[in-house]
Image: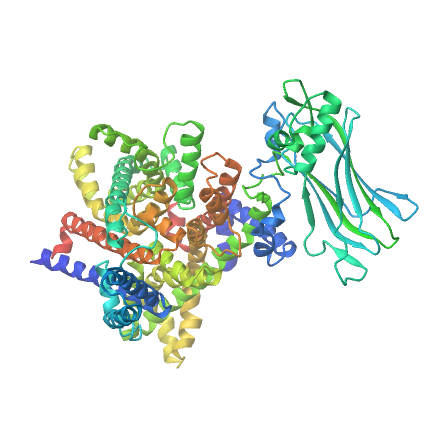
């Protein structure tokens, strides 16, 4: 009972965040007149199609114009363009929530379609692959090194890691990516400059997978370098604090083996606060992904963001802002579930 | 909790990180002051983003010190500029102004282009005749170019002013007349027969600076070149403002140039005050705003507290960069919009922390005493609570600064920087977008990133140094 209640509360809060963000976006779009532009483009699109199909049946140009004008009026009415933007707010918000934003101006899906929702959705997986794999790698490295360093506080490794984590706070992720390209792609020719597959991509599915791995090495390394310092440092600090607690001393005093004390008394207790830090760092990972994908031409949502800014495709920018918030909210919820599993105290 | 300023400073100065941080900051500030006092305000629009200003600079040239690391010396870039003629010869009807330029050419590769420029020309009777000759190290001379300043228009009366608004730039490279002249020169001196179009494709400058063999291969001729620009005048009042000769090089300056020929050292220098401005101004406003809300929220409490805390939770819970991109894209790329957005999304963390600190202070006896003495609420917040949290707020101000510098750089890199103000992020963005990293133009890619990191590290170091001051618990632990 307690578990379901806690999770429902978290879900409601996060959904509220999502809806508020969407409303905020729509208000900005309405107040700047951008939403008028988008809806007008949708009306024009339909009118154009209508004109093409009617031109075959209605030969009289004046009659054709009249019919089209009536239809245009109807469409304006339907899309709410005859009303001021603040009346249309809920309607526009619903459009954003369901990604019903019409067609992109210049950007296309890999197959050549131009429906915004298709363009965005087909790239979602690529972003998730990138972010997830780099997070898992940093987590594994961070946890192993962090715990190890916590047992030897003040050692060389400890000092290096704390400097590294302070410096990594000051290094732009994307610049690391650029430097990796310069060194490993340009000078040593070890890895590709970017993209998801070689051109042409290998036909054999297994070779194709290896080809993708080869392309993923540099972007994943970039994201890992950017986040692993913080992982190591927080793990070290939290483990260190836990290790000084009385119950740990008591366990040691009872003569329990060191390994058991570490795994069951220290790490188990330190896990929830470490996870809290991961949750707080989630937004940073998403930003890192946007920029890293851009640098490596990785065909995910982040690179699409860059492309849509370059060609000024505002519907795609809107869709992406929403999708990123959605991805963030979903990821956050999954982590909260994990948190509840790790920390029994939250359940009651 | 409250610390005397002097003790606090001593505590801060004890650490090496603080000293290094303050030294770095001093360098940043000095460079920024230099830029602010010596650069024009409209530097971005008038110079940096104005390609014609950089026409005479070599494109994508590495810094000139790369020559120290290689056996094959690349040609340096030479710009000769003269305001006064080097010599004046009288003639029957007027005089000839002579501008002489000496170039000691020692590179293993010919220059990349050759051009000259005339500025601010005035004449009274006949149009001036301009001639360019070169005498090479092998004592051979070539008359390279002949040009007549545009004649008076219909109804125009003297003085006839030419090339005042837009200097006249004549590129010998790519000029077919020069190519024909050089074809005759090659045939006459070396008995090498080449079509002008062939010369045009290998470059007029290559022919001028080298000796051909019978296989039409050109070897660089090292030594002293004398270029003479003679301008024939017909009236004593005739005047030429400035004459420039540019011998295009493959290396340039201390930092090299980008693909538009812009001198990167100039652009990178301009980035200093901008980065400091964005970092410090945004951080200051954000900290004051966030801390102010935190104090009010914590001290006043009640419904106001609820509203502020819920809003802070909300803003804290949204992924920042996507929304910033969205807003910068829709609202336009302007540095003030950017500062506003960074403040609008940066305040909540501090509000939440300061509020919890204020809640603890609120029950203190000194507050009770102030209330008992009838002090108004704003007085208590300003005079009693603010000084207590001020050291913490100040440390946060420093701590936040690199975040904003990096965010600005990130947005600039995505193409959302203010186009009228060049920043390090924008230099990197252009280097990335125009493919500089794919052809290995490292001098374009590495320095702006290092400068961003250096500036951010400066503030990180100072923040590290301030930690024991603000958080006395750490002091005891050491």
Residue B295 found in image quarter? bottom left
> Considering depth in this image, is B368 or A169 the residue closer to the camera?
A169
Quarter of the image with the C terminus of chain A in it: bottom left
Q: Residue at x 31, y 47 (%)?
A: A285
Residue B262 found in image quarter? top right
> Considering depth in this image, is B324 or B363 the residue closer to the camera?
B324
Where is residue A178 shown, x and y percent of the image?
42, 39
Where is residue A35 shown, x and y percent of the image?
32, 66
Q: Is residue B197 left or right of residue B184?
A: left
Q: Residue at x 44, y 72 (%)?
A: B383
Q: Is residue A120 left or right of residue A155?
A: left
> Considering depth in this image, is A37 or A56 the residue closer to the camera?
A56
Asked whether residue A17 appears in the rendered view, the answer is no
Q: Residue furthest bottom?
A: B374
Where is residue A347 shown, x and y percent of the image?
12, 55
Q: Is residue A8 left or right of residue B221?
A: left
Quarter of the image with the N terminus of chain A in it: bottom left
């Amino acid at each position: 009972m307690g578990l379901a209640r806690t999770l429902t509360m978290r879900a409601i809060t996060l959904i509220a965040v999502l809806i508020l963000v969407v409303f905020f976006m729509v208000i900005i779009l309405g107040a700047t007149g951008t939403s008028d532009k988008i809806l007008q483009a949708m009306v024009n699109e339909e009118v154009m199609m209508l004109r093409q199909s009617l031109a075959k049946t209605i030969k009289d140009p004046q009659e054709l114009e009249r019919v089209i004008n009536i239809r245009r009026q109807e469409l304006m009415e339907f899309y709410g363009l005859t009303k001021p933007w603040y009346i249309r707010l809920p309607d526009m918000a619903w459009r954003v929530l369901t990604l019903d934003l019409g067609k992109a101006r210049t950007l296309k899906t890999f197959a050549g379609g131009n429906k915004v929702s298709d363009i965005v959705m087909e790239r979602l997986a690529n972003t998730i692959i990138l972010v997830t794999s780099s997070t898992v790698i940093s987590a594994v490295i961070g946890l192993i090194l962090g715990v190890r360093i916590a047992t030897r506080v003040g050692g060389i490794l400890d000092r290096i890691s704390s400097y590294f984590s302070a410096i990594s706070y000051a290094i732009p992720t994307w610049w690391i990516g650029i430097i990796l390209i310069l060194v490993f792609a340009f000078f040593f020719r070890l890895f590709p400059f970017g993209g998801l597959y070689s051109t042409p991509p290998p036909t054999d599915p297994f070779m194709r997978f290896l080809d993708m791995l080869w392309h993923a090495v540099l972007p994943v390394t970039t994201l890992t370098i950017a986040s692993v310092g913080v992982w190591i440092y927080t793990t070290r600090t939290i483990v260190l604090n836990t290790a000084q607690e009385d119950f740990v001393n008591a366990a040691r005093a009872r003569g329990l083996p060191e390994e058991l004390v570490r795994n069951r008394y220290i790490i188990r207790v330190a896990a929830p606060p470490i996870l809290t830090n991961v949750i707080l760092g989630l937004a940073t990972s998403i930003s890192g992904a946007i920029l890293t994908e851009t640098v490596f031409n990785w065909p995910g949502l982040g690179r699409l963001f860059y492309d849509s800014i370059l060609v000024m495709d505002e519907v795609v920018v809107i869709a992406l802002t929403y999708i990123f918030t959605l991805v963030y909210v979903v990821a956050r919820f999954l982590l909260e579930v994990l948190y509840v599993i790790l920390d029994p105290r939250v359940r009651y | 909790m409250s610390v005397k300023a002097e003790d606090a400073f001593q505590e801060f100065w004890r650490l090496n990180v603080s000293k290094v941080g303050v030294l770095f900051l001093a360098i940043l500030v000095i460079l920024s002051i230099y830029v602010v006092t010596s650069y024009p305000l409209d530097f971005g629009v008038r110079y940096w983003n104005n390609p014609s200003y950089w026409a005479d600079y070599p494109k994508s040239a590495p810094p000139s010190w790369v020559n120290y690391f290689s056996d094959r010396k690349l040609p340096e870039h030479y710009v000769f500029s003269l305001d006064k003629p080097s010599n004046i010869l009288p003639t029957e009807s007027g005089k000839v102004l002579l501008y002489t330029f000496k170039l000691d050419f020692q590179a293993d590769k010919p220059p990349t282009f050759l051009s000259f420029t005339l500025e601010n020309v005035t004449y009274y009777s006949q149009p001036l005749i301009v001639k360019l000759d070169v005498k090479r190290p092998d004592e051979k001379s070539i008359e390279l170019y002949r040009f007549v300043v545009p004649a008076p228009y219909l109804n125009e009366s003297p003085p006839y002013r030419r090339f005042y608004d837009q200097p006249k730039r004549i590129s010998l490279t790519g000029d077919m007349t020069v190519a024909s002249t050089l074809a005759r020169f090659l045939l006459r001196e070396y008995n090498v027969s080449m079509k002008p179009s062939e010369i045009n494709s290998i470059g007029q400058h290559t022919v001028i600076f080298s000796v051909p063999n019978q296989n039409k291969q050109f070897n660089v001729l090292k030594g002293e070149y004398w270029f003479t620009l003679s301008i024939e005048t017909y009236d004593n009042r005739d005047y030429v403002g400035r004459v420039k000769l540019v011998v295009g090089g493959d290396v340039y300056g201390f930092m090299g140039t980008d693909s538009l020929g812009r001198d990167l050292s100039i652009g990178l220098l301009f980035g200093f005050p901008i980065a400091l401005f964005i970092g410090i101004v945004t951080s200051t406003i954000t900290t004051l705003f966030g801390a102010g809300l935190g104090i009010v929220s914590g001290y006043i409490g009640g419904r106001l507290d609820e509203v502020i805390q819920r809003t802070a939770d909300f803003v804290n819970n949204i992924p920042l960069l996507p929304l910033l991109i969205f807003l910068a894209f829709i609202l336009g790329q302007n540095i003030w919009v950017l500062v506003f957005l960074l403040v609008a999304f940066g305040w909540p963390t501090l509000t939440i922390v300061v509020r919890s600190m204020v809640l603890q202070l609120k029950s203190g006896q000194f507050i009770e005493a102030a209330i008992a003495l009838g002090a108004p609420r704003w007085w208590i917040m300003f005079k009693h609570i603010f000084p207590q949290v001020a050291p913490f707020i100040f440390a946060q101000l420093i701590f936040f600064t690199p975040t904003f510098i990096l965010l600005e750089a990130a947005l600039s890199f995505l193409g959302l920087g203010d186009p009228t103000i060049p920043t390090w992020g924008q230099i990197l963005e252009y280097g990335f977008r125009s493919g500089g990293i794919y052809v290995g133009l490292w001098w374009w890619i590495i320095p702006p990133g290092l400068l961003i990191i250096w500036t951010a590290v400066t503030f990180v170091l100072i923040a590290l140094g301030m930690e024991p001051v603000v958080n006395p618990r750490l002091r005891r632990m050491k």
